[in-house]
């Protein structure tokens, strides 16, 4: 799951950088592109967060089962 | 056919899930049929074989574009994404958030209806529907944009449901890690969500204008190009994910490079989408020259994800096939189960991808845009991809999924195994003639190319060949739709064997040791050589043209 | 004792690095682009005395404000009025452009750099600047559904400064030249300026390459080059 999270974060970063480029560099100034790539970065960050949350839940479940089996 | 967990999982899905998936696939086939009939009509008009009133010809073209590019490709993708996400999260046994997916389906159907109303009334705007062409705001124009917005809402809902199907089993402790297809489903769903947002960016201002709630959008073209670029990548990504699934189903094998490598390759689709988007705008006046140059350079990477997936699949197949006795450079290809309709569809999809891919690389060079960008070269090449690669792959998948969901055997598999070849033959005529016409300057989106006798006679001759190829494609696709509809509707005894008696080749079990895989790299060499050839032709034509264009600017 | 034998090495065609390298193989097309001078990294040294680049794309205007649609219509009508012929076609005045073209032709006839320097002939760059200043102006408006003027009469070898605008919706003012076409996209209300020089006599179809409505395929003009 760590790889899944990392890959989605990398995607979000690439999209965010490009959104910044389109928004700030005069030669590339295209607000529509900036908005879509920026929103896209948010979407992929959200997906990464969902995967991270699922991983945390899985780790807690393992810890809980580990404690229960020692009792 | 090799018994495979996918068929097992499909059979074990709850009836409600099956109904939803079949609803998506059924809607997709209906929209494909409408789009194909409209496309066939357009081809006949362009070939001069029928001569309707001008509005009617462009209306056919509009309905063709809307129904194929927006509705067929996206109903099919929605169904495939939901099917894969529900069956490829380990231990998953059902779809999550099914009601949200049904809401998505309803929104997509509503969008389809609205778009047909818009396409059938008012000024035909073609599928990109620039509001400036409508001249006056009206409900008829507005329904096209509302239709697209409703489709976008529907796809967003479907994508969220698919992500839930992959991620929620993890929350419930039912799965340990994401499979490559599970990860790909999330990436695919993410790109669908972004495309939905891009659709809102493009069409909401236009819809507000059409209903007199806002001004005429100033830069509709840019909003369209952003969406259009995403809509190029989505079907390709969906296609290669489907290949992964089907190769496992047909042969029982997975990538020899491991799941981590596959996930990295799937994520390259998302990494390369934004930077490679500028080539759609090369002809826009006012686009700075450095932007064109940088856009060209970055666009070189556009095919890297698809090529990587192709290499992974081919190398994995070839090494397993050699381990099972295949010999000679291409002997393993002959041993593939070509009489299986799924194999035939995927095999021809790969062939058509090579043709379309090689041609597409001419268009990403900004210096060649003035020669080719708005000519018939464009539909000439992209039908290799939309029909020959994406649609054949999706239909091949349905040859597997519809029997898997209904439990009924595929109707007339011999016919279905032959249809990819018929479609490809039609494409060869359509694409070759179309590309040549484009090189010779023939414009796209024109019904009558004679220009009162001032146009070269070759344009009309080539459009005749385009029309013939188009009819062959249309026949193949209509037969596909009919065969799948009969499979779905015909009451037949439930097939006892999961594989329905279709030929297959079980390659599972053998671990290749020091097997070689030459087919992939040789294919890339041929592909690059072909790209170079088409590019050289274009450059030489520009050099030989009796026109020097110096300095350009826009205000 | 059990020996652990390492797995047999995989063939290089099945190594991940090779797959990645092959996957990026299509990027090698850059080399071809560079060979044609269509990439930032040029393989050939740029020759200042060479003929004007047929690929176009040398610099451009700054982003100054251009005329609006009404002003451009007026300029086009004035251009037509000033240059129209009895048959309705339009032939723009040539000015100094023909003299410069003849001078450049003589310059290219002399391959010896010393000879060129002795005769103090202008370089191609200087000529380009002079051409820009002296090229006859041509105004071309695209509208639903035609071009104004519909027929232009030009001279071969003479550079013309085209001022083009779509005055209602987006059009293409595309030229069928030689075996192929040269596409110019015109957004409504946006002035596009381009210097064009026809190198061979002939009749060249002007046609619209952006769908612009019901009679899109009737939209045509002509450039007759003598």
Image (tube, rainbow, N blue to C red):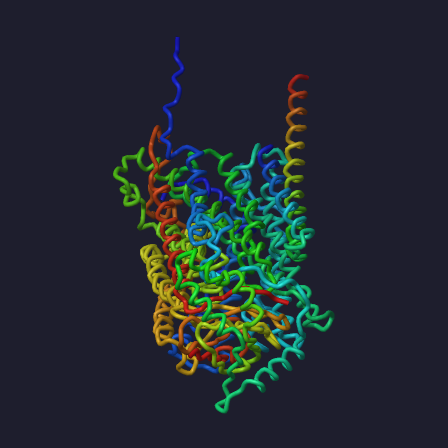
Tell me if residue B404 can be seen.
no
Return the residue nearer the eye: B118 or B456.
Answer: B456
Q: Residue A11 sits in which quadrant? A: top right
Q: How many marks?
A: 0
- Front residue of A21/B486: it is A21
For residue B204, what is the image quadrant? Answer: bottom right
Give the vertical position of C67 relative to B327 (above or below): below
Q: Position of residue B148 (x, y in %)?
A: 61, 63
B386 on left or right of B462: right
The single residue placed furthest to the right in the displayed view is: B213
Q: Residue furthest left?
A: B328
In terms of image quadrants, where is residue B170? top right
Q: Position of residue B306 (x, y in %)?
A: 46, 47
Q: Is residue C106 left or right of residue B415?
A: right
Figure check: B529 above or below C102: above
On-image quarter of the N terminus of chain C: top left
Residue reaching furthest front? C118
Furthest residue to the top?
C1
Q: Position of residue B303 (x, y in %)?
A: 47, 49
Q: Quadrant of the C terminus of chain C?
A: bottom left
Q: Is residue B450 visible?
A: yes
Q: Position of residue B271 (x, y in %)?
A: 56, 45
Q: Please tell me which residue lies in front, C174 or C97.
A: C97
Residue nearest the observer in this picture, C210 or B11: C210
Image point 41% across, 32% down: which residue? Answer: C15
């Amino acid at each position: 799951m760590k790889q899944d999270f990392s890959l989605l974060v990398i995607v979000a970063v690439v999209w965010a950088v490009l959104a910044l480029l389109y928004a700030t560099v005069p030669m590339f100034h295209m607000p529509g592109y900036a908005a879509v790539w920026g929103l896209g970065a948010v979407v992929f960050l959200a997906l990464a967060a969902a995967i991270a949350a699922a991983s945390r839940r899985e780790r807690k479940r393992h810890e809980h089962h580990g404690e229960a089996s020692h009792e | 056919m090799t018994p495979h967990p996918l068929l097992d999982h499909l059979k074990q899905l709850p009836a409600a899930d099956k109904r939803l998936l079949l609803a998506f696939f059924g809607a997709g086939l209906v929209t494909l049929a409408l789009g194909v009939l409209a496309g066939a009509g357009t081809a006949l008009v362009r070939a001069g074989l029928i001569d309707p009133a001008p509005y009617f010809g462009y209306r056919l073209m509009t309905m063709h574009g809307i129904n194929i590019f927006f509705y067929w490709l996206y109903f099919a993708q929605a169904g495939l994404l939901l099917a894969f996400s529900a069956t490829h999260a380990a231990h998953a046994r059902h779809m999550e958030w099914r009601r949200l997916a049904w809401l998505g389906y309803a929104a997509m159907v509503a969008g389809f209806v609205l778009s047909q109303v818009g396409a059938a009334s008012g000024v035909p705007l073609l599928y990109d529907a620039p509001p400036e062409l409508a001249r006056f705001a009206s409900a008829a124009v507005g329904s096209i944009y509302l239709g697209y917005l409703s489709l976008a809402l529907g796809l967003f809902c479907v994508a969220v449901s698919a992500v839930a199907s992959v991620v929620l089993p993890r929350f419930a402790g039912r799965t340990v890690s994401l499979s490559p297809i599970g990860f790909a489903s999330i990436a695919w769903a993410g790109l669908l969500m972004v495309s939905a947002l891009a659709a809102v960016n493009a069409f909401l201002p236009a819809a507000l204008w059409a209903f007199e709630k806002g001004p005429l959008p100033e830069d509709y073209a840019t909003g369209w190009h952003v969406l259009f670029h995403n809509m190029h990548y989505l079907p390709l990504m969906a296609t290669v994910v489907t290949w992964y699934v089907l190769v496992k189903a047909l042969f029982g094998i997975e990538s020899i490079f491991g799941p981590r490598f596959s996930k990295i390759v799937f994520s390259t689709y998302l990494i390369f989408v934004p930077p490679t988007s500028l080539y759609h705008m090369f002809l826009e006046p006012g686009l700075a020259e450095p932007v064109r140059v940088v856009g060209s350079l970055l666009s070189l990477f556009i095919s890297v994800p698809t090529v990587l997936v192709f290499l992974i699949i081919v190398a994995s197949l070839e090494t397993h096939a050699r381990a099972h006795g295949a010999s000679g450079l291409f002997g393993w290809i002959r041993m593939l189960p070509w009489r299986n309709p799924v194999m035939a569809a995927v095999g021809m999809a790969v062939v058509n991808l090579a043709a379309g891919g090689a041609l597409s690389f001419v268009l990403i060079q900004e210096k060649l845009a003035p020669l080719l960008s708005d000519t018939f070269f464009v539909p000439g090449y992209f039908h290799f991809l939309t029909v020959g690669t994406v649609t054949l792959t999706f239909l091949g998948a349905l040859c597997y999924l519809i029997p898997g969901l209904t439990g009924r055997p595929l109707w007339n598999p011999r016919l279905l195994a032959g249809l990819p070849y018929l479609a490809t033959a039609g494409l060869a005529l359509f694409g070759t003639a179309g590309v040549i016409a484009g090189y010779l300057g023939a414009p796209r989106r024109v019904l009558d190319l004679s220009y009162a006798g001032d146009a070269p006679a070759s344009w009309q001759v080539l459009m005749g060949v385009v029309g013939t190829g188009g009819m062959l494609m249309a026949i193949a696709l209509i037969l596909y739709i009919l065969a799948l509809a009969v499979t779905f509707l015909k009451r037949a005894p439930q097939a006892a064997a999961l594989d329905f008696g279709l030929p297959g080749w079980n390659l599972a079990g053998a671990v290749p040791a020091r097997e070689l895989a030459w087919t992939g790299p040789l294919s890339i060499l041929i592909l690059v050589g072909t790209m170079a050839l088409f590019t050289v032709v274009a450059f030489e034509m520009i050099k030989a043209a009796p026109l020097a264009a110096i300095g350009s600017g826009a205000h | 004792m059990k020996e652990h034998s390492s797995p047999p090495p995989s063939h290089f065609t099945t190594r991940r690095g090779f797959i990645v390298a092959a996957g990026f193989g299509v990027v090698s097309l850059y080399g071809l682009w560079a060979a044609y001078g269509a990439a930032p990294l040029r393989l050939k040294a740029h020759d200042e005395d060479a003929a004007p680049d047929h690929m176009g794309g040398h610099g451009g205007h700054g982003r100054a404000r251009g005329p609006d649609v009404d002003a451009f219509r007026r300029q086009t009508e004035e251009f037509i009025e000033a240059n129209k012929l009895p048959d309705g076609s339009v032939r723009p005045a040539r000015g100094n452009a023909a003299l410069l073209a003849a001078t450049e032709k003589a310059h290219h006839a002399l391959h010896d750099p010393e000879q060129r320097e002795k005769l103090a002939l202008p370089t191609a760059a200087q000529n380009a600047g002079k051409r820009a200043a002296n090229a006859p102006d041509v105004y071309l408006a695209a509208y639903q559904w035609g071009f104004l003027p519909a027929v232009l009469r030009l001279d071969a070898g003479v550079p013309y400064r085209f001022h083009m605008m779509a005055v209602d919706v987006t059009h293409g003012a595309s030229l069928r030249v030689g075996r192929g076409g040269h596409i110019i996209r015109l957004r409504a209300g946006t002035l596009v300026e381009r210097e064009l020089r026809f190198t061979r006599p002939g009749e060249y179809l002007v046609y619209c390459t952006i769908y612009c409505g019901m009679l899109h395929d009737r939209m045509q003009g002509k450039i007759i080059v003598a």
